[in-house]
Image: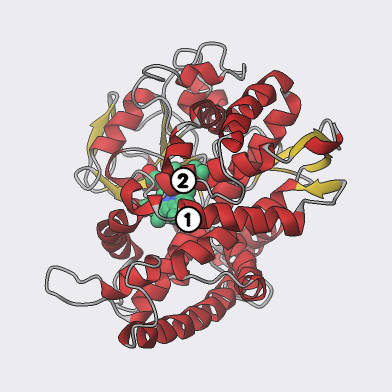
Amino acid sequence: MELFFLCGLILFTLSISASLGFLFFYNKSKFSYPNLPPGKMGLPYIGESLEFLNTGRKGCPEKFIFDRIAKYSSHIFKTSILAEPIVVVCGATANKFLFSNENKLVQAWWPDSVNKIFPSSSQTSSKEEAKKMRKILPNFLKPEALMRYIGMMDSIAQRHFEAGWEGKEEISVFPLAKGYTFWVACKVFISVEDPEHVAKLADPFNALASGIISIPIDLPGTPFNRAIKASNVIRKELRAIIKQRKSDLAENKASPTQDILSHMLLATDENGQHMNELDIADKILGLLIGGHDTASALITFIAKYLAELPHIYNQVLKEQMEIANSKRPGELLNWEDIQKMKYSWNVACEVMRLAPPLQGSFREALNDFMFSGFSIPKGWKLYWSANSTHRNPECFPEPEKFDPTRFEGNGPAPYTFVPFGGGPRMCPGKEYARLEILVFMHNVMKRFNWHKVLPDEKIIVDPMPIPAKGLPIRLIPHKAT
Ligand code: HEM
């Protein structure tokens, strides 16, 4: 993806060379706004995108941030990424400021590619669609609703381990983790569990996921072009599923509460209107994207840290085996079991602190405003960064040390631990993610110990952190130990 991204950048830069002069003068005037935060805008159009991408490619995206904090002696700096002037804000105060000024001073912003891949059926912007999504999602993703899905998740996990892990000596964690999270999502969102049907959806999905944040050049072979094609294939497939479900619901062959799709089909807005099919297809697509690579990146890093830290592995094992031993043969996990997985969740949180699946996200200034003594012009983009607090010794003493006890008692100070964001736009899939991660941890711990095949495997952040070779591990089934 990176290679394409870089090629795309170069191609695009060349193709717009005629307009660079204009851009330069246009940007120069924008960047000379008085009292802007310190920082460098880099080359016209390209800005500091290459440095930003390079630090990620080298596995240390936080370096981009911390180098600039040190250079400018400031927790706020300006830069230019993805052809946009951007103010990066760092630290708990900045997180609090952004998260509590949602839709007052700032609003959601996505790169152009996202808007183009989701030309919503109702012809509104992706921002409007996100607002709609935000209204309906809590109904399906709140803990009470999700409790019902724990058994489903456990039964998919068991089938996943039988098919992909058991009887194998060596496996790669990341591709398998993707398979697991996608299978669970297909089951919980749309009741698709047949592995062949799941695979039919998964193939175009991977193309979509790798082109969604890219330079929006719609030419054959670009990641963006492949993502658009893939999104159309998935939409078509989803619409067939939606049509079938509508008729099953009408004939009482499907249950109104069986999954998120049934909920969406029956939900009405304040005017009593149902969502149309294309809207539903887009919402399901958005959920599949939001929840897919994030959770699989987290699972992969949990496996990595547990392989590296046997004392942590042993404590997670103890907790999970106590739960496993309390179950009757064949009995699936339930809400009470999940509540007992406190140490396991603290471990997952510590993994997200050190390797947040999403590094941060963007906002757009709705008006000119001041923050930390600097002006932020209307229309500029802002970026909050999880690493700016997660790896800050003032927020987390000895930040490089893996220590799940940080999450005991009251846990970290407010706005310092933000892997799911915060405020009104905090990730709506947080609870769902917690359940699928804990169900996965339970299933892997009760079956295996493991060693890393590549002790120094490189980490690439593009845009999520992933071990470069997908984390190959050697499995040691418990029965054999
Ligand atoms: C470990 C897993 C996950 C992590 C770390 C994560 C993290 C995040 C973060 C940081 C945001 C952005 C918040 C912001 O812009 O301030 C976000 C948004 C979002 N997430 Fe997650 N997420 C995860 C799993 C999921 C899952 C499983 C789903 C779906 C079931 C999901 C659905 C979404 C959606 C729809 C949004 C957009 C919300 C909006 O724009 O209002 N996420 N997530």
Marks 1/2: CA distance? Answer: 25 Å
Residue ID at (60%, 51%): 330
Q: Quadrant of the C terminus?
A: top right
> Could you tell which of marks 1 and 2 lies nearer the N-terminus?
1
227 in relation to 424, above or below: below
Can you give x and y, in whole percent of width and height, for residue 431 in the image?
41, 44
Residue bearing the label numbered 2: 334
Can you give x and y, in whole percent of width and height, for residue 144 in the image?
32, 49
Q: Quadrant of the N terminus?
A: bottom right
Q: Name the one closer to the observer, 387 or 188.
A: 188
Can you give x and y, in whole percent of width and height, for residue 177 in the image?
66, 51
Label 2: element kind: loop
For this view, does 429 lie left or right of residue 447?
A: left
Judge: label 1 CB < 8 Å from ligand 1. yes
Report how many numbered discs are placed on residues in the image.
2
Type of colouring? secondary structure
Question: Please, what is the three-letter code of the amino acid marked with disc 1?
Answer: Gly
Residue bearing the label numbered 1: 290
175 in relation to 449, above or below: below
Which quadrant of the structure image shows residue 339? top left
Camera-side mark, 1 or 2: 2
